[in-house]
Amino acid sequence: MNVFDALLQSTGKYKAGYFILIDPDKTPVAQLPALLTKAIEAGVDAFLVGGSLLLTPDFDGYLQTFKKYSQHIPVIIFPGGVHQLSAYADGLLFLSLLSGRNAHHIIGTQVIAAPIIHRLGIEPISTAYLLVESGRATSAEFMSGTVPLPRHKPEIAAAHALAASYMGFQTIYLESGSGADHSVPEEMISIIYKSVSIPLIVGGGIRTPEVAAKKVKAGARFIVTGNILEENKGSDFIRSFVDAVHNG
Ligand code: 1GP
């Protein structure tokens, strides 16, 4: 079974699955053993690895260490660009920035990446990436040079989600951006959830288990947090997120 289907199955007994995003530029390789052990003990469902810049050299080496400590938990690349590809992951989010109107980020980068992904033999998880306005400009917004979806226009977001579903994407990632002031509004998640049957990943600016649970109640199938766990939180903190996401 492929990685994404296996994840849907392994988290099927919960309301939603919980992913932790680890940015190699913020988490040095030496911190991985302790962080991953803690996260696995707490019950996370998958690790996402990537960042907007990736200044850390030797992405392969980073992922090799990652895989050494990730045990049975899937490691999925969340790439900020074609330089973030590696054979030492279980899969990658094959992102298309459908909320933007920059063809390079909708199909250009994907054409460059596809033959490399094929050669590396990692599983691409076709993902419609929808950036949502969240207060101050986020890295994803700035780096992609695109205008995010207006946060108070859920019907526009829902139209994008429907288009993504008709285009055959496996999943939709509703993204407020790393460290966002405001997370994706529940109203938007809920309208999209009612419009499409493909699973929704929701991330960006989620800082408490209570907020994570609200996203799950609104229809998120997977929750992603990044920044909050880079602040050296203990396993009890991670477990409180796991519980909130699993139980909604
Ligand atoms: C960013 O959705 C992820 O791409 C996670 O965001 O770092 O704000 O949790 P945070």
Image: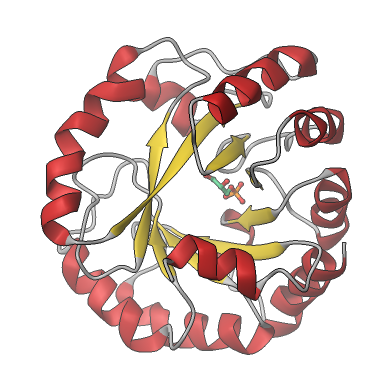
Q: Residue at x 80, y 58 (%)?
A: 208
Q: Residue at x 88, y 57 (%)?
A: 210
Which percent across, then down, holds residue 163?
57, 20
Q: Quadrant of the C terminus?
A: bottom right
What colour scheme governs how the chains and residues are painted in the rendered image of this protein? secondary structure
On screen, residue 13 above or below 86: below
Q: Quadrant of the N terminus?
A: bottom left
Which percent across, then down, holds residue 59?
21, 62
The answer to whether residue 132 of the structure is visible from this angle is no
The quadrant where residue 67 appears: bottom left
Q: Nearer the viewer, residue 29 or 112?
A: 112
The quadrant where residue 149 appears: top right
The answer to whether residue 114 of the structure is visible from this angle is yes
Q: Is residue 156 left or right of residue 131?
A: right
Q: Is residue 36 left or right of residue 192?
A: left
Q: Residue at x 72, y 49 (%)?
A: 206
On screen, residue 87 above or below 175: below
On screen, residue 225 above or below 114: below
Which percent across, then down, holds residue 6?
53, 70
Which percent across, then down, holds residue 78?
40, 51
Q: Nearer the viewer, residue 96 or 62?
A: 96
